[in-house]
Amino acid sequence: MIGLGADGGSALALSLRVALFATLLDLPLAILVAAVLARGRFPGRAALNAAVHLPLVLPPVVTGYVLLLLFGRHGPIGAPLADWFGLVFAFRWTGAVLAAMVMAFPLLVRPIRQSIEAVDTRLEAAAETLGAGRIARFATVTLPLALPGILTGAILGFARALGEFGATITFVSNIPGETRTLPIAIYTALQIPGGEGTAMRLSLVAIALALVALAATEIVARRLRRRWVD
């Protein structure tokens, strides 16, 4: 891409692809977990909530190392996936997607959970009296009303996945064209004498993408709230 160089353009394209896949794969599970935390009452609820938010407080390097142990070529999860399905994560762009999914997941769950908790349960009860089952109530009442939180979570998760660095470089290393995402490309440029200019240009792109994501979050949430009020 113009001004970024071949490596910078490749890193940006890879970051966008990784963030998109991570968000799309995270979203269904995030909705399910958010619904369970918002409506469920069961003994392990606090433990599940802690596990969901653990990536926010753990050093990203620790998260990446755990992923490497579990999903590495000889790991307890990675080995059967590779042998039975040919799915390899370690040192592949698919591993970058997995790392981004784990790190972004809490940011998807939190706003979705808050939106589901804000839905008036009397509306769900009314749908139940009309014969709607649990899944039907969730799909036709809860989900539409929680849409602002779902979209907000998706955008925030995408932005977080786009900027993921620590877990990614630990899990999949720094391989040009394969795992070198935009943050890793910035780090690499700073290690090269005279690479400050490239690092600056890539950093400006990263800042611009983050600002666009935050602005989109506000715009989407505002428009959806206005539509529901009207």
Image (cartoon, rainbow, N blue to C red):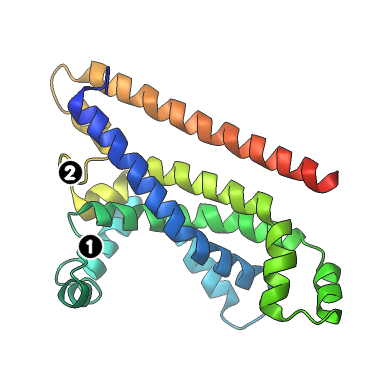
What is the x, y in percent for residue 33?
Answer: 56, 69
Q: Which numbered tag is attached to residue 68?
A: 1
Query: Is the C terminus in the top left, top right, bottom left or bottom right quadrant?
Result: top right
Q: Residue at image x 22%, y 71%?
A: 78
Disc 2: which residue: 174
Q: So how many labels did they put on this image? A: 2
Label 2 neighbour load within 10 Å: few <14, some 14-19, many 20+: some
- Indicate the secondary structure of the residue bearing disc 1: helix
What amino acid is found at the position of numbered circle 2 in the picture? Asn
What is the x, y in percent for residue 144?
Answer: 70, 58
Most foreground residue, 47 or 188: 188
Q: Residue at image x 24%, y 47%?
A: 169
210 sits left or right of 140 in the view: left
Q: Which numbered tag is attached to residue 20?
A: none
Most foreground residue, 5 or 44: 5
Q: Residue at image x 60%, y 49%?
A: 151
Label 1 neighbour load within 10 Å: few <14, some 14-19, many 20+: many
Q: Is residue 107 above or below residue 189?
A: below
Q: Earlier in the sequence, mark 2 or mark 1?
A: 1
- How far apart are labels 2 and 1 at the CA level? 14 Å
Most foreground residue, 47 or 93: 93
Q: Residue at image x 24%, y 20%?
A: 198
Most foreground residue, 125 or 170: 125
73 sits left or right of 141 in the view: left
